[in-house]
């Protein structure tokens, strides 16, 4: 049975694979619905995560805890040369995002969150390009790597 073309979902933005350190916190809008254990929150009130893909529409986030769909998050993306534990590094980008998709990717447990940027005006294409350039500068693809 052929699908109706009106039902097809097409990505608006190209995704770029990466692996950048980041931290997230539950936004005030969702803080009543989602309460995290103090054992997983760092002293600065955030959770360490990894950004695994970037687009102008949102971010792919890998983390070790479950966060429900529709949760509003504040995210800070750092450079590869920073130490998240020091707390002294400035983020390359800060954005508000909403969880759109959740996928358990391993039994560790490990989850992939597909997010959308809350206010697309807050994140410009130039900032996304800067993040991609930063990642490529500090983590160049090795010759023979087939995951390009």
Image (cartoon, rainbow, N blue to C red):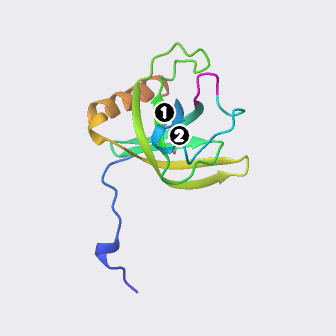
Image check: 38 left or right of 100?
right
Task: Bin the neighbour count of mark 1 within 10 Å (Cα to Cα): few under 14, some 14-19, many 20 and up.
Answer: few
Q: Point out the residue furthest to the bottom here.
A: 1
* Residue tagged 1: 141
Residue at the location (60% across, 32% down)?
47
Q: 96 or 4: nearer the eye?
A: 96
Image check: 10 left or right of 63?
left
Report if the CB atoms under discs 2 and 1 are less than 8 Å apart. yes
Residue at the location (63% across, 48% down)?
66
Q: 142 or 78: nearer the eye?
A: 78
Q: In which quarter of the image is residue 5?
A: bottom left
Q: In this view, does 101 lie above or below 125?
A: below
Residue at the location (47% across, 23% down)?
79
**In magenta segment, residue 31:** no
Q: 144 or 44: nearer the eye?
A: 44
Q: Give the range drawn in magenta.
A: 42-46
Residue at the location (66% across, 46% down)?
110
Q: Position of residue 13 (x, y in %)?
A: 32, 49
* Residue tagged 2: 145
Q: In this view, does 112 lie above or below 5?
A: above
Spatial distance from mark 2 to mark 1, Cα to Cα?
Answer: 7 Å
């Amino acid at each position: 049975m052929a699908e109706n073309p009106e039902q097809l979902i097409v990505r608006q933005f190209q995704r770029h694979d990466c692996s950048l350190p980041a931290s997230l916190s539950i936004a005030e809008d969702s803080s009543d619905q989602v309460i995290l254990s103090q054992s997983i929150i760092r002293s600065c009130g955030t959770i360490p995560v990894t950004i695994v893909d970037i687009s102008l529409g949102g971010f792919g986030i890998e983390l070790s805890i479950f966060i429900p769909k529709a949760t509003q998050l504040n995210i800070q993306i750092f450079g590869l040369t920073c130490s998240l534990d020091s707390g002294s590094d400035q983020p390359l980008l800060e954005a508000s995002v909403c969880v759109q998709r959740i996928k358990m990717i391993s039994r560790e447990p490990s989850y992939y969150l597909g997010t959308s940027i809350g206010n697309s005006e807050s994140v410009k294409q130039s900032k996304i390009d800067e993040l991609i350039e930063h990642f490529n500068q500090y983590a160049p693809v090795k010759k023979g790597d087939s995951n390009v």
